[in-house]
Image: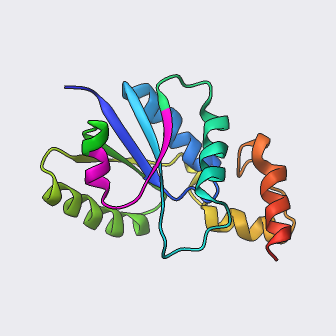
Amino acid sequence: MSNIAVYPGSFDPVTNGHLDIIKRAARIFDRVYVAVLTNSAKTPMFTVEERMDFIRRTVAPYSNVEVDSFSGLLVDYMEQKKANVIIKGLRAVSDFEYEFQMALMNHKLSREVETLFMMTSGRYSYLSSSIVKEVARHGGNLSDLVPDILADEILHRARESK
């Protein structure tokens, strides 16, 4: 059986916390798909294509990481990619309750799918895309929050969306 994982999320925008999980997952799995969720119920700051580009630029050194997008059920996407593990990053206990319910539902929908919870590094436990967008809207310093190569673009978009 292949050792393939999917790390799903909105990544609006990708943060250093996300990147921490991606790097660690890349050491464990043969292939990791970072799958950007297309969610029509949300109004993201960046398009799916922009988010995928951001992630591609930050994961370029990892040959076993591929960036993709999906809509619909995650288990259907997993089957399409022949993946058997969902990676979920947890920052705090408050993340666990929702993610646990999702893990149980995904396992109910597909007995082949397991969820691996990875604790975000302590230095990123406070970090979320929402916080990054809020800091950026107010012109705050994004260093240590997002990959350096993305900071100016995120700040620019945040100023435009005010």
| In the image, residue 16 above or below residue 131 | above
Using the image as rendered, state which of residue 10 and residue 114 is in the foreground.
10
- Count of numbered circles on the image: 0
Q: Magenta stretch: give its range.
A: 66-78
- Residue 52 is a magenta residue: no
Residue at 57% across / 55% down in the picture?
11
Q: Quadrant of residue 116?
A: top left
Left or right: residue 6 compared with residue 58: left
- Residue 35 placement (x, y as % from top left): 45, 47
Left or right: residue 109 compared with residue 44: left
Left or right: residue 77 compared with residue 42: left
Residue at 84% across / 57% down in the picture?
141
- Residue 157 placement (x, y as % from top left): 80, 63
Using the image as rendered, state which of residue 28 and residue 70 is in the foreground.
70
Left or right: residue 106 compared with residue 10: left
- Residue 75 is a magenta residue: yes
Residue 109 in view, yes or no: yes
For the N terminus, the quadrant is top left
Residue at 79% across / 50% down in the picture?
151
- Residue 99 placement (x, y as % from top left): 34, 63
**Image coloring type:** rainbow
- Residue 92 placement (x, y as % from top left): 46, 62
Using the image as rendered, state which of residue 39 and residue 145 is in the foreground.
39
Using the image as rendered, state which of residue 81 and residue 94 is in the foreground.
81
Residue at 56% across / 49% down in the picture?
122
Residue 14 in view, yes or no: no
For the C terminus, the quadrant is bottom right
